[in-house]
Image (spheres, rainbow, N blue to C red):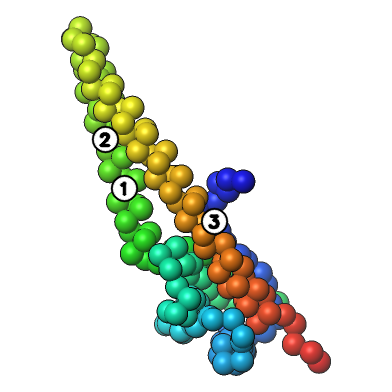
Amino acid sequence: MINFRVRPRISCVTPMSKNEILTRFNDFLIHTDKPIRGKKLRHHIELRVKPEEQHYWSPVLNITFDKADNGTIVRGRFGPEPKVWTLFMFFYFLALAICFFSGMYALVQLKINHTPWSFWFLGGGLTLLALIYIAAQIGQQKGHEQTEWLMTFCSEVLKQKPS
C-alpha cells in the first residue's frame, strides 16, 4: 500500500519535564535490546539505528521538546539520513525545473506557431518525478521495520512512570 506521507511525525504530551525525559532516554538506550543509538544535541535528541544494522534507507528520528501547561510536548519526525534526503530533494528540484522550463518553452512554441517539441521534455520530467516518488516509497518500505523499532522505543520511554 502506498503511503502518501513523506516524513511521518509523532506528537504527544507527557507530564514529565524535559530533564526527566532526557534521563529516561539515556537509561533506555543503555538497556534496550534493539540496535538503537541516540545522541542528545543542543535542543533535541536524534535516534538512529546502530551502524551494524544500518542500510541506505535506515530512518532517523529527530525529537524536540516544548514546554506545555501540563508537562512537555514531545514532537518527533522520521526521515532518512540527511545525505539521502539531500539527494532526493536535489532530484525532485531537478525534475521540477525540467518540467517548469520545458512547459514554459512549449507554451512559447505554441504561441509563435512552432511545433512544441519541448513537450517531450515535459513528459520526461513528469516521468522522472514519478520514478523518484516510487523510489522514495520503496525506500520507506525497506526502512519500515527500523521505523517501528524507533517508534516502539520512543513510546516505551514516554510511558507514564509508575508511582
Reading the image, the residue beneath label 3 is 141
Q: Upstream in the sequence, badge 2 or badge 1?
A: 1
Q: Residue at x 61, y 68 (%)?
A: 148
Number of the label disc, if any, that sits on residue 98:
2
The circle on residue 23 is: none
How far from the left and from the top, in percent, is residue 128? 35, 38
- Distance of label 2 from label 3 (alpha carbons): 28 Å
For label 3, the SS is helix
Q: Quadrant of residue 158?
A: bottom right
Within-10-Å neighbours for mark 2: few <14, some 14–19, many 20+ = many
Q: Is residue 3 above or below residue 57?
A: above
What amino acid type is highlighted by mark number 1? Answer: Phe
| Residue 39 percent across, percent down from the top left | 46, 84
What distance separates the C-alpha of mark 2 from that of mark 1? 10 Å
- Nearer the N terminus, badge 1 or badge 3? 1
Farthest top residue in view: 113
Question: Where residue 91 is drawn, which disc sits there?
Answer: 1
The percent position of residue 161, horizontal first and vertical second, equals 74, 87
Residue 38 located left or right of residue 91: right
Say what secondary structure mark 1 lies in.
Answer: helix
Please name the residue shown 31% across and 40% down the image. Answer: 95
Q: Using the rendered image of the protein, determine whether residue 141 is visible from the camera's viewpoint.
A: yes
Disc 2 on helix, strand or loop?
A: helix
Identified at 30% across, 51% down, the residue is 90
Could you tell me how far apart the alpha carbons at marks 1 and 3 are, in whole angstroms?
A: 20 Å
Q: Nearer the viewer, residue 4 or 68?
A: 4
